[in-house]
Image (cartoon, rainbow, N blue to C red):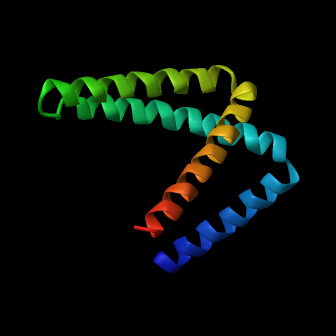
Amino acid sequence: MSRVLFIIAGVLSVLAGLYALINPFPATLVATVMAGWAFLIYAVLQVVAAFQAEGWGGRIWSILIGVLAFIVGIEVLANPLESVLTLTLMVGILFIASGVAKIVASFH
Protein backbone atom coordinates (compact mmCIF):
# COMPACT_ATOMS: atom_id res chain seq x y z
CA MET A 1 0.00 0.00 0.00
CA SER A 2 2.78 2.45 0.84
CA ARG A 3 4.29 1.84 -2.60
CA VAL A 4 1.08 3.01 -4.25
CA LEU A 5 1.02 6.12 -2.06
CA PHE A 6 4.62 6.92 -3.01
CA ILE A 7 3.77 6.55 -6.71
CA ILE A 8 0.72 8.81 -6.32
CA ALA A 9 2.74 11.38 -4.37
CA GLY A 10 5.49 11.22 -7.00
CA VAL A 11 3.09 11.74 -9.90
CA LEU A 12 1.39 14.64 -8.11
CA SER A 13 4.78 16.21 -7.37
CA VAL A 14 5.84 15.93 -11.00
CA LEU A 15 2.55 17.46 -12.17
CA ALA A 16 2.79 20.29 -9.64
CA GLY A 17 6.39 20.96 -10.68
CA LEU A 18 5.46 21.05 -14.36
CA TYR A 19 2.57 23.38 -13.63
CA ALA A 20 4.89 25.67 -11.66
CA LEU A 21 7.42 25.74 -14.51
CA ILE A 22 4.75 26.43 -17.12
CA ASN A 23 2.91 29.02 -14.99
CA PRO A 24 5.50 30.59 -12.67
CA PHE A 25 3.47 33.66 -11.68
CA PRO A 26 0.38 31.81 -10.39
CA ALA A 27 2.64 29.21 -8.75
CA THR A 28 4.52 31.99 -6.96
CA LEU A 29 1.26 33.48 -5.70
CA VAL A 30 0.10 30.09 -4.46
CA ALA A 31 3.41 29.58 -2.65
CA THR A 32 3.09 33.03 -1.10
CA VAL A 33 -0.45 32.35 0.11
CA MET A 34 0.71 29.01 1.53
CA ALA A 35 3.48 30.84 3.39
CA GLY A 36 0.89 33.25 4.80
CA TRP A 37 -1.20 30.37 6.10
CA ALA A 38 1.93 28.71 7.50
CA PHE A 39 2.67 31.90 9.46
CA LEU A 40 -0.89 31.90 10.86
CA ILE A 41 -0.72 28.25 11.87
CA TYR A 42 2.69 28.82 13.44
CA ALA A 43 1.31 31.82 15.34
CA VAL A 44 -1.49 29.77 16.87
CA LEU A 45 0.90 26.96 17.84
CA GLN A 46 3.32 29.48 19.33
CA VAL A 47 0.65 31.05 21.53
CA VAL A 48 -0.55 27.61 22.63
CA ALA A 49 3.06 26.73 23.50
CA ALA A 50 3.27 29.93 25.55
CA PHE A 51 0.80 28.53 28.03
CA GLN A 52 3.04 25.49 28.51
CA ALA A 53 6.20 27.54 29.08
CA GLU A 54 7.50 27.92 32.59
CA GLY A 55 8.16 31.37 33.94
CA TRP A 56 6.89 34.67 32.67
CA GLY A 57 10.00 35.42 30.60
CA GLY A 58 9.55 32.45 28.29
CA ARG A 59 5.81 32.92 28.18
CA ILE A 60 6.00 36.58 27.20
CA TRP A 61 8.56 35.94 24.43
CA SER A 62 6.50 33.06 23.10
CA ILE A 63 3.35 35.20 22.98
CA LEU A 64 5.22 38.08 21.32
CA ILE A 65 6.63 35.78 18.65
CA GLY A 66 3.16 34.33 18.10
CA VAL A 67 1.63 37.80 17.72
CA LEU A 68 4.38 38.83 15.30
CA ALA A 69 3.88 35.67 13.23
CA PHE A 70 0.13 36.35 13.17
CA ILE A 71 0.69 39.90 11.91
CA VAL A 72 3.10 38.66 9.22
CA GLY A 73 0.62 35.97 8.15
CA ILE A 74 -2.24 38.45 7.86
CA GLU A 75 -0.04 40.89 5.93
CA VAL A 76 1.12 38.20 3.51
CA LEU A 77 -2.45 37.03 2.89
CA ALA A 78 -3.75 40.60 2.51
CA ASN A 79 -1.00 41.63 0.04
CA PRO A 80 0.37 38.54 -1.72
CA LEU A 81 1.85 40.46 -4.66
CA GLU A 82 3.93 42.73 -2.43
CA SER A 83 4.82 39.80 -0.19
CA VAL A 84 6.40 37.85 -3.04
CA LEU A 85 9.41 40.18 -3.12
CA THR A 86 9.66 40.33 0.66
CA LEU A 87 9.60 36.55 1.03
CA THR A 88 12.19 36.16 -1.73
CA LEU A 89 14.48 38.64 0.02
CA MET A 90 13.98 36.85 3.35
CA VAL A 91 14.86 33.48 1.80
CA GLY A 92 18.00 35.01 0.27
CA ILE A 93 19.01 36.53 3.60
CA LEU A 94 18.32 33.18 5.32
CA PHE A 95 20.59 31.35 2.87
CA ILE A 96 23.37 33.92 3.28
CA ALA A 97 23.15 33.85 7.09
CA SER A 98 23.06 30.05 7.11
CA GLY A 99 26.06 29.86 4.82
CA VAL A 100 28.08 32.34 6.89
CA ALA A 101 27.17 30.49 10.11
CA LYS A 102 28.29 27.16 8.60
CA ILE A 103 31.56 28.65 7.37
CA VAL A 104 32.26 30.18 10.79
CA ALA A 105 31.28 26.94 12.54
CA SER A 106 33.63 24.96 10.32
CA PHE A 107 36.60 26.84 11.80
CA HIS A 108 35.66 25.97 15.41
Q: Is 88 positioned to the left or the right of 1 in the image?
A: right
Residue 28 x/y as whole percent:
75, 42
Residue 8 x/y as whole percent:
61, 69
Image point (53%, 25%), residue name: 72
Q: Is 52 positioned to the left or the right of 25 in the image?
A: left
Residue 51 higher or lower than 105, as above or below: above
Residue 39 x/y as whole percent:
49, 33
Image point (83%, 47%), residue name: 24
Q: Can you name the residue that lies furthest to the front here? A: 107
Residue 51 higher or lower than 71, as above or below: below
| Rendering quarter of residue 53 | top left
| Rendering quarter of residue 48 | top left
Image point (62%, 26%), residue name: 76
Q: Can you name the residue that lies furthest to the left here? A: 55
Q: Is residue 29 visible?
A: yes
Image point (46%, 28%), residue name: 69
Q: Is 24 positioned to the left or the right of 45 in the image?
A: right
Q: Quadrant of the C terminus?
A: bottom left
Which residue occupies the foreground of this view, 31 or 9? 31
Which residue occupies the foreground of this view, 9 or 94? 94
Residue 37 x/y as whole percent:
53, 34
Residue 101 higher or lower than 87, as above or below: below
Q: Can you name the residue that lies furthest to the right here? A: 22
